[in-house]
Image: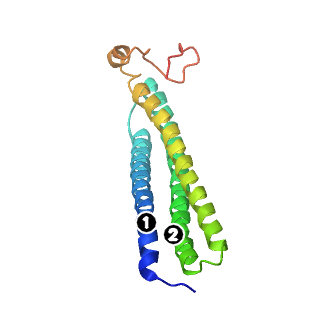
Amino acid sequence: MNLDLANILKVIGPAASIIFAAWIFMGFLQVRYDSAIDRYRELIEKYRTSELSESRKANMRDQIFRYKRRCELMGYANIIGLTSAILLIITLIAGGLSLAFPDDNVFKYVSLSLALIGLSLVIVATAIVMREGVITNRQIYNELLDIPDLAEGVGREAGDISDPHRRSNPT
């Protein structure tokens, strides 16, 4: 056993920055998720308790469904992001064990495999956030649809988003 602690810390120390980056990314995901959940709950409460025009009610219903989908996507992104962070932490542990036991290649292979999987999961979580961003963009425009002068101001047709006779607008 070659236990040179100074060497181990020199080697895995810089790699720990990847772990910090993963946790920063997790913080970003959690903030987006919490924000979407809060807005989702607010919209449901407003839908339950407010007197709304039929157009506004239909558009709000669409918004609620979009927020529900966003919350689901961000929940998946959070789980994937946490899994990625765990795998990257285990990568550091396996890397440290690889330095402590240089004749045992299993730790090198485990470390490499987990690092690749962990970093790939960061990409997957980011792709999910990008999909959630597309939904957010749609919400930004559709929120204006029950206010004619605002809808027209962004080149959209005012009215009920769920109207089957509605002219399709680019989203």
Residue 21 lies, in percent from the top left, at 41, 57
Q: Residues within 10 Å of mark 2 (few under 14, many from 20)?
A: many
Circle 2 — which element?
helix
Residue at image point 38% right, 18% down: 151
Q: Which residue is mark 2?
A: 92
Above or below, 85 against 165 in this view is below
Residue at image point 42% right, 16% down: 158
Above or below, 58 against 110 in this view is above
Q: Which residue is mark 1?
A: 16
CA distance separating discs 2 and 1 = 7 Å
Above or below, 124 against 22 in this view is above
Q: Nearer the viewer, residue 167 or 30?
A: 30
- Whether residues under marks 2 and 1 lie with C-beta atoms below 8 angstroms apart, the answer is yes
Q: Nearer the viewer, residue 49 or 60?
A: 60
Residue 149 lies, in percent from the top left, at 32, 15
Above or below, 138 against 79 in this view is above
Q: Residues within 10 Å of mark 1 (few under 14, many from 20)?
A: some
The answer, for residue 32, to whether it is visible in the render is yes
- Identified by mark 2, the residue type is Leu
Count of marks, rendered view = 2
Q: Nearer the viewer, residue 79 or 145?
A: 79
Residue at image point 59% right, 56% down: 116
Circle 1 — which element?
helix
- Identified by mark 1, the residue type is Ala
Q: Nearer the viewer, residue 98 or 39?
A: 98
